[in-house]
Image (tube, rainbow, N blue to C red):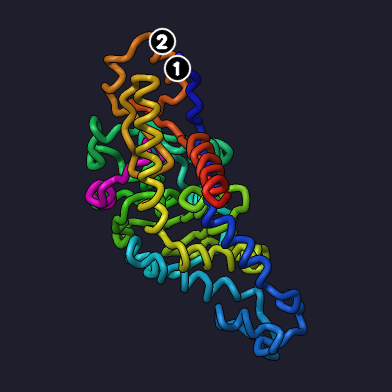
């Protein structure tokens, strides 16, 4: 059997479109922006002011402590077509990816007396790991077998699109959980890597939302585009107004407005399909394309027709009752082949 290079963990593809944008933004920010005595209306910041209305202190100097506020406002606006109710959350914090926000939401829950959390079977392992650090119990549920109304009301951590298989969980499922009296923390780390879809976060029992640009835009190693939104204040995140990377915030704004949560899927879902077709031809696995273009999956029962050798090969990829495969190595190979083709065509 030929080599199978899908990844168990989901590491993103560093998209060429994003690489160019990151360099452009970083090079465009003048050194004067970091000076505590620089006035917000300084001619040295003219190009920055064209991008963003720069917050000012009472003395008229650049207020970098507050610069995340207009940036997050703009990102919420850029995401309005896919997360319409995101602007309803009063408290908004810049974070280093979604994991930081998740930990602080968990910590607040623990301080408030929550001793356990609920997750879906096969969910993102980070919820369980961080809950264990806080001495919280993790209850795992298969909604095909257990209805939310039959579970004692509690706090759910749910990724949507789901980290289990990269597929969108219908809004009706989230609503059913909320209507059963549960509180929900929604992790939208895969939003932007799927077909256009409106993720409904408007239910009053959606307590918090975290976002990350790592997976949809390939900036995992840079910690760009992490945000936490909450209906209640998260005191431990207050200090992030000072302890944040302003360059990364400007890069996140550029990604949100100039690429956005719909553009890359149209292009890279075609690549995803090509990769999966090739893998199925070589390995005979009948992999399915996930809603997130970074992933492929097998549903429960899809493995029944596989040989012992095939089952052994995919065993590390099991998630709950199904299987999940990260296609990033194949995206990188396709990207290199594209560069080679381009070089030969230019010659």
Image point 39% across, 15% down: which residue? Answer: 311
Image point 39% across, 40% down: which residue? Answer: 272
Q: Position of residue 240 (x, y in %)?
A: 62, 63
- Image marks 1 and 2: residues in contact by CB distance under 8 Å: yes
Instruction: Measure the C-alpha gap from mark 1 to mark 2.
Output: 6 Å
Taking the image as shown, residue 129 lies to the left or right of residue 262, namely right
Out of 57 and 166, give the one closest to the viewer: 166
Say if 326 sits above or below 42 in the image. above
Residue 172 lies within the magenta run: yes
Q: Position of residue 25 (x, y in %)?
A: 62, 67
Say if 26 sits above or below 55 in the image. above
Quarter of the image for residue 64 reads: bottom right
Q: Which residue is mark 2?
A: 309
Part of the protein shown in magenta: 163-178
Out of 105 and 245, give the one closest to the viewer: 245
Taking the image as shown, residue 33 lies to the left or right of residue 79, namely right
What is the tally of numbered marks visible in this picture?
A: 2
Image point 38% across, 34% down: which residue? Answer: 296
Disc 1 element: helix
Quarter of the image for residue 241 reads: bottom right
Q: Which residue is mark 1?
A: 313
């Amino acid at each position: 059997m030929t080599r199978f290079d899908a990844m168990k963990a989901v590491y993103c593809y560093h998209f060429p479109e994003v690489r160019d944008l990151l360099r452009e933004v970083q090079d465009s920010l003048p050194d004067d922006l970091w000076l505590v005595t620089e006035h917000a209306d300084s001619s040295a910041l003219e190009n920055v002011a064209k991008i963003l209305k720069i917050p000012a202190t009472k003395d008229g100097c650049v207020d970098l402590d507050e610069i995340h506020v207009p940036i997050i406002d703009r990102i919420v606006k850029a995401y309005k077509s896919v997360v319409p109710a995101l602007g309803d959350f009063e408290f908004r914090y810049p974070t280093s990816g979604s994991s930081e926000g998740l930990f602080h939401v968990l910590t607040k829950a623990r301080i408030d007396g929550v001793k356990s959390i609920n997750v879906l079977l096969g969910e993102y392992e980070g919820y369980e790991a961080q809950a264990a650090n806080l001495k919280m119990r993790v209850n795992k549920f298969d909604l095909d077998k257990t209805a939310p109304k039959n579970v004692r009301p509690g706090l759910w951590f749910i990724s949507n699109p789901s980290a289990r298989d990269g597929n969108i969980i219908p809004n009706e499922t989230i609503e059913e959980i909320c209507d059963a009296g549960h509180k929900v923390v929604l992790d939208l780390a895969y939003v932007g890597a799927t077909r256009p879809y409106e993720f409904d976060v408007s239910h009053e029992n959606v307590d918090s939302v975290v976002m990350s640009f790592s997976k949809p835009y390939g900036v995992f190693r840079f910690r760009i585009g992490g945000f936490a939104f909450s209906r209640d204040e998260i005191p431990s995140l207050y200090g992030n107004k000072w302890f944040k990377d302003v360059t990364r915030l400007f890069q996140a704004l550029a990604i949100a407005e100039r690429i956005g949560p719909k553009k890359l899927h149209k292009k890279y879902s075609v690549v995803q399909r090509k990769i999966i077709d090739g893998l199925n031809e070589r390995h005979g696995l009948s992999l399915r394309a996930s809603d997130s273009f970074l992933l492929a999956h097998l549903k429960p029962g899809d493995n029944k027709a596989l040989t012992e050798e095939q089952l052994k090969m995919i065993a590390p990829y099991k998630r709950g009752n199904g299987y999940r495969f990260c296609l990033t190595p194949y995206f990188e190979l396709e990207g290199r082949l594209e560069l080679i083709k381009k070089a030969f065509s230019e010659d």
